[in-house]
Image (cartoon, rainbow, N blue to C red):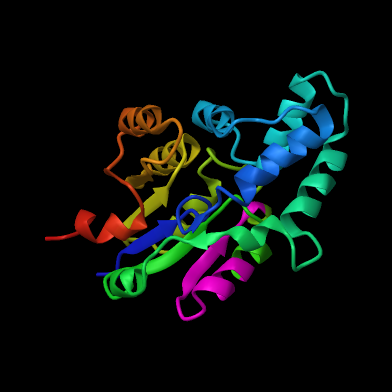
Amino acid sequence: MSQPILIFDMDGVLVDVTESYRETIARTVEHFTGRRLAPAEIQQFKNQGGWNDDWKLSHHIVAEAGVDTPFEQVKVHFQSIFHGNGTDGLMLREQWVARPGTLEKLNRQFRFALFTGRPKWEAELTLQRFAPELEFSPIVGMDEVRRHKPDPEGLLQILDANPGAKAYYVGDTVDDARCARAAGAPFIGIAPPSNPLYIDLVFLFQEQGAYAIVDDINYLEEVFAE
């Protein structure tokens, strides 16, 4: 029988993006509207679903504020904050969530794959920075699919490439949960107590039939303990 697969989302799962992607959304919106978003406001959009793409979310919030700015202009400004000049971008504020040895131990039981809303090259850069010794295969990013989460296209790509293998999807948003459900894969929800809408997120995961809900990926081992 094929070795089971753990398919990870990246943002909020493998890496803490509070000071990177979430902060970049806030700064981008503030740049165009003059108003600073609270973390709970961003989480409210994420809990609504349909806002997996942070570029589109930033543009939506800017437009909702009555500011008529082209999407591409918002995206360019967003990327300028996230990447900076290569040494000062908010991407460098990201923190790897797994404690030493946690994923290595899981990797003895599971193969790893990645389905993320990031561009694939960004995801590979992050994995190379934090966990160069771990193999995630395949890596499916936003450019490898025509339809983004909650559409299950990317997840189905991975499942179809591994027929017969038991696969779990680990994510931190309702879009991840809906994607897993549509693909027929058990979903493991990441809901850190530090999330400003923690209880709401837990209820959303439960509504989507989550296989398990944990604070972070350091608790995954307990999910699969015999």
Residue 225 in which image quadrant: bottom left
Residue 100 in the image: state x and y as whole percent.
Answer: 36, 73
The residue lying furthest to the bottom in this view is 133
Q: Residue at x 64, y 44 (%)?
A: 23
Residue 158 in the image: state x and y as whole percent.
Answer: 47, 59
Q: Residue at x 49, y 50 (%)?
A: 12
Residue 32 in the image: state x and y as whole percent.
Answer: 83, 32
Residue 6 falls within the magenta-colored stretch: no
Taking depth in this image into account, of 196 and 138 the one nearest to the observer is 196
Residue 115 in the image: state x and y as whole percent.
Answer: 52, 55
Picture layout, residue 77 above or below residue 110:
above
Q: Quadrant of the N terminus?
A: bottom left
Residue 37 in which image quadrant: top right
Q: Is residue 161 visible?
A: no
Taking depth in this image into account, of 126 and 160 the one nearest to the observer is 126
Q: Which residues fall within the magenta stretch?
A: 125-142
Residue 60 in which image quadrant: top right
Picture layout, residue 145 above or below residue 147:
below
Taking depth in this image into account, of 188 and 83 the one nearest to the observer is 83
The tally of labels here is 0
Q: Is residue 106 visible?
A: yes
Q: Is residue 115 left or right of residue 221?
A: right
Q: Residue at x 61, y 56 (%)?
A: 141
Picture layout, residue 188 above or below residue 3:
above
Q: Quadrant of the C terminus?
A: bottom left
Q: Is residue 210 left or right of residue 55?
A: left
Q: Is residue 130 left or right of residue 191?
A: right
